[in-house]
Amino acid sequence: MANIISDETIEYVGILAKLELSDEEKEAAKSDMGRMLDYIDMLGELDTSDVEPMSHAFPVQNVFREDVVTGTDIRDQILANAPEEKDGMFVVPKTFD
Amino acid sequence: MSYITELDALSLGRAIASGEIRTTEATEEYLKSIEEQDGTYNCYVTVDGDRAMEAAKEIQARIDKGELSDSPLAGVPVAIKDNMCTEGLLTTCSSRILYNFVPTYESTAVRKLRNAGAVILGKTNMDEFAMGSTTETSYFGPTRNPADPEHVPGGSSGGSAAAVAAGECAYALGSDTGGSIRQPASYCGVVGIKPTYGTVSRYGLIAYGSSLDQIGPLTRNVSDAAAVLTAISGHDDKDSTSVDMPAKDYTQALKKDVKDIKIGIPKDYFGEGLDHEVAASVRAAADVLKAAGATVEEFDLSLVNYAIPAYYTIAAAEASSNLERFDGIKYGYRTEDFAGLHNMYKKSRSEGFGAEVKRRIMLGSFVLSSGYYDAYYLKALKVKALIKKAFDDAFAKYDIILGPVAPTTAPKLGESLSDPIKMYLGDIYTISVNLAGLPGISVPCGTSTDGLPIGVQLLADCFNEEKLLRTAFTYEQTK
């Protein structure tokens, strides 16, 4: 069963992944994803009706810590990595009109 | 290589502790080795020469005062894969999107090594965001295999494996999500361990597949690997998946004795697609262990082929989520021309990420999306449970599972990236180990007729690194 990936699907995936692809990249992506999904379809051969999905091989649960601040003020070091910075703040594109 | 860079990590550690070699000498020799060879091999993204020398001086001063006497790795120079945050030192994941990122904090594994007196030489090259099996998806160009520079070193910890093999460091740290320590170790002819999931803290390791990633050592021999694993492992409050168990000294496991060890060899591993010389070399390794007193027999592992699609579904899904943070806002690459916030996100990410990373992010976003989540992602998690069960059943009968690390020796540069699925199939022996959280080690076991290294993989049940190391050590000392 071949997975045919439509243009709409690639557009949709591009929105989810926040990626913008050129027309060539879109064609390559449709073909690559189609092939990968065909390969992944192999999992359908296995009967998993009685199996619980397992995320971690041995789950460690309810790992909590006290809500206490332990870090130090490193604002300047953090801002040193900023693509754009002003007055101790990250400069970003407008987020609302 | 000078006589200093020819010493393995523990031997160098002993020579430094006894005063025979000064840490500054050792660091200088390694920096020279890097200068002489790295133009050819491209193991390093960043060499931190000045600070390495400063650290060496400080550590020597401490040793002279009698400190660090309980640390066998004190003064020994190490290379760190470039996906582990090193405070104040460029950390790129070999990606354009982090081309200028300088972490403000340190990964726990690196901090532990520093506390043990390690000298950090620099950061090694890798496949971008650890996605790849050849170190060819790096933004900074591929690393070449010191055994034959026309061939890849493997991946994604190719820089680390090659640096150890070329004598550009005494040992290195790598990370393993689907085989990324074990496979380059095999291709380069060095030792590599992926510990049981949860053994080494992932704090500071830039995440690829959070339920699969583990940090581990790449070394010249099994003893070094045991010592490094001891230094970096242990519970960490900052990693909620790190297992709360008492600290272990893995070097206690280094004994030549396998009389109580039952080894199982999966028949399904030796089918079509496995190179003849690799198969012969791996079987010969099993014979060595049999002659040393272990019981060796074949068995059916099952589900071997299903591990790859399950892995790629899960790893891509987790990666798509983990890599969402790279958005050009607070750090890393931001595109120059954009129209509004969403356009900035898309362009920064599309320009900042390479093709393989984008491929996996898209696949991951798709399998997690509404309408497909159950059919793909949940299905893969159910198959993961079946794979874990298959290993549980196997370890009820055997102490160690033995097999190849990869179906072939290292391919030539430029041959692997055009067919992603073919590349993914090369992970067949290593991938299920991450899905089941098991520990695995790759030990050199031979060389092909064209001079390329071959490794044998040993697996043990979770938290059984001692059996793993004892068996590996016995093989290494006996062969």
Image (cartoon, rainbow, N blue to C red):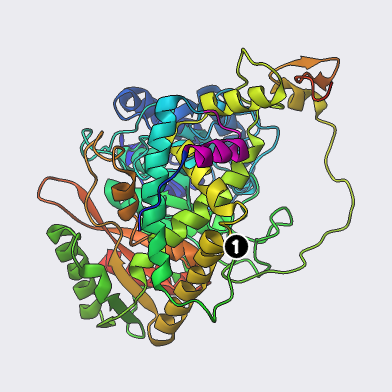
Quarter of the image for the N terminus of chain B: give it: top left
Q: Chain of mark 1?
A: B
Please say whether residue B396 is one of the residues in the magenta stretch: no
Region of the chain picked out in magenta, as a range: A7-20
* Apparent side of residue B347 relative to residue A75 in the rendered image (left or right): left
Quarter of the image for the C terminus of chain B: give it: bottom left
Instruction: Identify which residue, B457 or B64, lies in the foreground.
Output: B457
Q: Hey, what amino acid is under mark 1?
A: Gly
Tell me residue A49's x, y (percent). 52, 79
Please say whether residue A13 is one of the residues in the magenta stretch: yes
Tell me residue B105's x, y (percent). 69, 37
Instruction: Identify which residue, B385 or A89, lies in the foreground.
Output: B385
Per the image, label 1 sits on a secondary structure element best described as: loop
The image quarter in which residue B31 lies = top left
Decide if residue B223 is in sight here.
Answer: no
Residue at the spot 48% in from the left edge and 44% down from the top edge: B360
> Which residue is outermost to the left?
B449
Decide if residue B471 is in sight here.
Answer: yes
Residue at the spot 78% in from the left edge and 18% down from the top edge: A91
Q: Is residue B101 above or below residue B362?
A: above
Instruction: Identify which residue, B199 or A33, lies in the foreground.
Output: A33
Tell me residue B54's x, y (percent). 58, 27
* Apparent side of residue B419 relative to residue A49 in the rendered image (left or right): left
Instruction: Provide the residue designation for mark 1.
Output: B198
Query: Magenta residues: mostly which secondary structure?
Result: helix
The image quarter in which residue B338 lies = top right
Count of numbered circles in the view? 1
Tell me residue B350's x, y (percent). 53, 27
Q: Is residue B168 above or below residue B278?
A: above
